[in-house]
Amino acid sequence: MAEQINTEELKENISQRSTWLRLLYIILLAVIFTITEFIIGVVVVIQFGFVLLSGKTNDDLKQFGDALSRYVFDMLRYLTFNSDELVFPFAEWDYGPSAPKKTASAPAKKKSTRKKAHRRS
């Protein structure tokens, strides 16, 4: 049987500023995600061109593609509510070659410089 909706709790949830702020971040990051998808597609095509013409990958493009893929991973974690850590441009860009890498199964434990969006527990 469906749970009864507590109207007081519902009013409180709807009036939470942090919830509406997160919606704004979600909309902006969704737009950024779409742009990033296009950029990744361009990187893939150019990298394929390097392999086709020279038989080797371009190291700079590999690093850039790696940084973008980690950025998209973190962005999607925020968009799907699996993380409260905001990503660039609302936090520092920490996806350079020396930045610690995270894996899907075990995110790296590090002190983050990213802002966290407030969420009611």
Image (cartoon, helix red, strand yellow):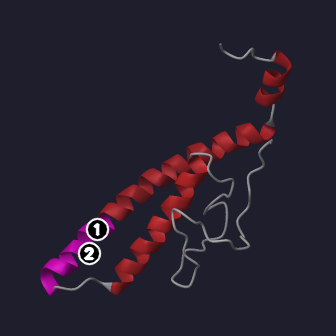
The residue drawn where x is 79% and y is 38% is 17
The percent coordinates of residue 11 (x first, y second) are 81, 22
Asked if the magenta segment contains residue 51, the reply would be yes
Q: Main secondary structure of the magenta part?
A: helix
Q: Are marks 1 and 2 in contact (CB under 8 Å)?
A: yes
Write down the quadrant of residue 61 in the picture.
bottom left
Q: Give me the disc on residue 94.
A: none
Asked if the magenta segment contains residue 21, the reply would be no
**Amino acid type of disc 2?**
Gln
Q: Quadrant of the C terminus?
A: top right
**Amino acid type of disc 1?**
Val
83 lies above or below 2? below
The percent coordinates of residue 95 (x first, y second) are 55, 74
First to last magenta residue range:
42-54
Q: Residue furthest left?
A: 53
63 lies above or below 118? below
Q: Nearer the viewer, residue 52 or 5?
A: 5
Q: Label 1's element?
A: helix
Give the residue at mark 2: 47
Q: CA distance from mark 1 to mark 2?
A: 5 Å
Q: Give me the disc on residue 44.
A: 1
The percent coordinates of residue 29 (x first, y second) are 56, 51
The percent coordinates of residue 73 (x first, y second) are 50, 60
Write down the quadrant of residue 15 in the picture.
top right
Q: Nearer the viewer, residue 42 or 69?
A: 69
4 lies above or below 55? above
User: In the picture provided, is 19 more to the left or to the right than 93?
Assistant: right
The residue drawn where x is 60% and y is 71% is 93
Q: Residue furthest front?
A: 1
